[in-house]
Amino acid sequence: MKFRDYQEEIITKGSDVIAEHGFVYLAMEVRTGKTLTSLGIAKEMRAKSVLFITKKKAISSIEADYQMMEPKFTLEVINYESLHKIEGSYDLVVLDEAHSIGAFPKPSKRAKQVRIIIQKNDPLVILLSGTPTPESYSQMYHQVYAIPGNPFKRFINFYRFCDTHVHVTQRPINGFNIKDYSNGMPSIMDAMQPYFISFSQKEAGFQVKTNEHVLHVKMSSLTYNVAAKLQKNLVVEGESEVILADTPVKLMMKLHQIYSGTVKFESGASKILDLTKAKFIKEKFKGKKIGVFYKFKQELKALQEVFQDNLTTQLKEFVNSKKSIALQIVSGREGISLRQAECLVYYNIDFSATSYWQSRDRMTTKERKKNEVYWIFSEGGIEDQIYKAVINKKDYTLNHFKKDLLNL
């Protein structure tokens, strides 16, 4: 295999950074080849044993890149949820989608597990992300706090880090004033600059144009009746199950489910109420190899009931067959390529702006000139309001919902 020219340059520069500081952060936009570039740095640094931590859906494609490269080092690829199984020793660790370990003010479970691995092995570290701080600069602290040479090592914890780098404010929640640590200062990224290598799709020569289409479908009368009754009474009782929306958050979630044809009951059980969206997608995209994103588990069951054997959830089967693929938005938005898809179709939409921007880029390659993305929204549902928020890079929140509720 041969690296692209820009990848060769980043490998050389990244190797210099990691040799000097012990780690490097590759902030490369999606589809620019972060995985191969990181493996190229591992090869340049003459690593012997590499641990690559990623999302489960991305494991097969990373292993394929490794086999294509045929480097001398050994590679173990594992997902973040399986870190407790790690037993080997490694001289280089790659943290894919590093922003996913950036929770604050307290470190997440996966951030703590990564820290244990780094403390045990004292490896060189490569961090990868197309969106290093998608919601707040404060997300940077726990991404690097486990690395001995990180620029914030003088701070004993996140709270002392905030004394210098975060405008801490008060936010009222349920009648209480809660400290808000999300207003991180630009000084955080200034401190990270010596360790950062940023690279965009534009710099790589990508010229893809993404065309988005919003299609509306009329759901069954059952869907609208259940939604209206829940909105009015905050409860819908059946013979054996209850739909309860006794808080604004629950009402937002339940309506989000119902308008796309599924619901989760108070008991924890779930049910498909309406197959309209799944049937519409099958008919509209008949004969096409598509990637379908869904939000709730019952939506996958609806798709499987309608598509039967023409749908898979496995990337390898999707690549090697004529089948379309269905992926949950959050788990499928990062680390995988759907370049074989003729278009992307969204059964539903996530509240997260990060999910919107990352997932819709899954088909992009340097050679591709056009992406077709379709959003399937229910007439009179909540999806249009969510869409208006996320395309403006804002998460859809409870405050948005309360304003929109009057129009539903």
Image (cartoon, rainbow, N blue to C red):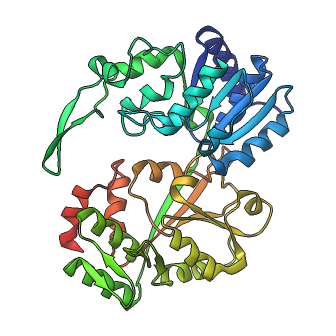
For residue 63, above or below residue 221: above
With 159 as the anchor, is 81 left or right in this view?
Answer: right
Quadrant holding the N terminus:
top right
- Point out the residue furthest to the top here: 20
Determine which quarter of the picture holds residue 335: top right
Residue 278 spot, x, y in % from top left = 54, 79
Which is more toward the observer, 164 or 185? 164
- The picture places residue 232, in percent across and down from the top left corner, at 20, 80
Q: Is residue 305 left or right of residue 174?
A: right
Question: 211 or 151, which lies in front?
Answer: 151
Give whichever of 383, 271 is nearer the camera: 271
Quadrant in which residue 293 is drawn:
bottom right
Instruction: Please state the horizontal and vertical placement of residue 323, each as a whole percent of the image.
Output: 73, 70
- Residue drawn at (57%, 47%) of the image: 334
Residue 307 seen in render: yes
Above or below residue 135? Residue 377 is below
The residue at 45%/53% (across/down) is 356
Q: Where residue 16 sits in the image (x, y, percent)? A: 65, 12
Q: Can residue 26 be seen at all in this image of the molecule?
A: no
Which residue is rendered at x = 33% and y = 49% of the image? 394
Q: Quadrant of the C terminus?
A: bottom left
